[in-house]
Amino acid sequence: MRKLFLLVSAIFLISCGEEMLPKPKGYLSLEYPEKTYKRIMLHKPYSFETAQITQSKDLPKNWMNVEYPTLKASVDITYRPIEGNLRELLMESEKLVFEHAIKADQITAPVEYANPDKKVYGSVYQILGNAASQVQFHATDSSKHFLKGSLFFYTKPNYDSILPAVEYIKNDMIHMMETLEWK
């Protein structure tokens, strides 16, 4: 009985210390360069401005990648001429956005964009969560040109970790749409 009392007393005294809590995970404090832009100089039926820190990679079919080497990301640009198939192109673009619904926590309602002077009309979608692509847009002149852009990172998505980079590049993608010109 005396041994049991000593054992219970020892456990009680040991457990009465300061409460130990695990330390929270540390996150990087990322700083991004000030925004400056340059017009892409590739022979395409379109042109727009990209961030100075990007590299443009020319691809066949008037496609291209706007690469962010320091952020390990790219905006993949696909171009399709409109040949009486605008409705199908719009549906395909929306379908590609909603393919990410399996991994996404939420897909925001599209933010519509229109610049009648330059004949640029489009939408921007943001995909929240651990989806493969976090931001997508499409733009068209409704008669000849259709352009789609999708943001991808070269790593397995962890939305909380890449969120600052997503916001940084999303603003660049909106700038691409605002400076888009058809040739």
Image: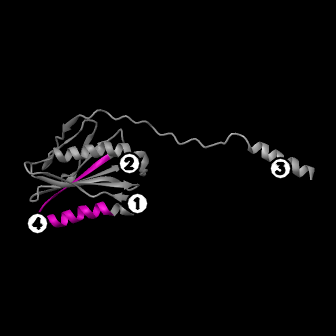
Secondary structure beneath label 3: helix
Cβ–Cβ below 8 Å for labels 4 and 3?
A: no
Please report whichever mark, 2 or 1, sits nearer to the chain's N-terminal start. Answer: 1
Q: Give the residue pinned by disc 3.
A: 8
Please report whichever mark, 4 or 3, sits nearer to the chain's N-terminal start. Answer: 3
Q: Please, is residue 95 above or below residue 50 in the view?
A: below
Residue 165: x, y in percent?
A: 35, 43
Which numbered disc, 2 or 1, marks the residue closer to the eye? 1
Secondary structure beneath label 4: loop
For this orientation, the residue located farthest to the left is 117
Q: Give the residue pinned by disc 2.
A: 154
Please report whichever mark, 4 or 1, sits nearer to the chain's N-terminal start. Answer: 4
Q: Nearer the viewer, residue 138 or 154?
A: 138
Residue 84's tag is 4
Q: Residue at x 39, y 63 (%)?
A: 102
Color theme of the render: one colour
Please report whichever mark, 2 or 3, sits nearer to the chain's N-terminal start. Answer: 3
Q: CA distance from mark 2 to mark 3?
A: 56 Å
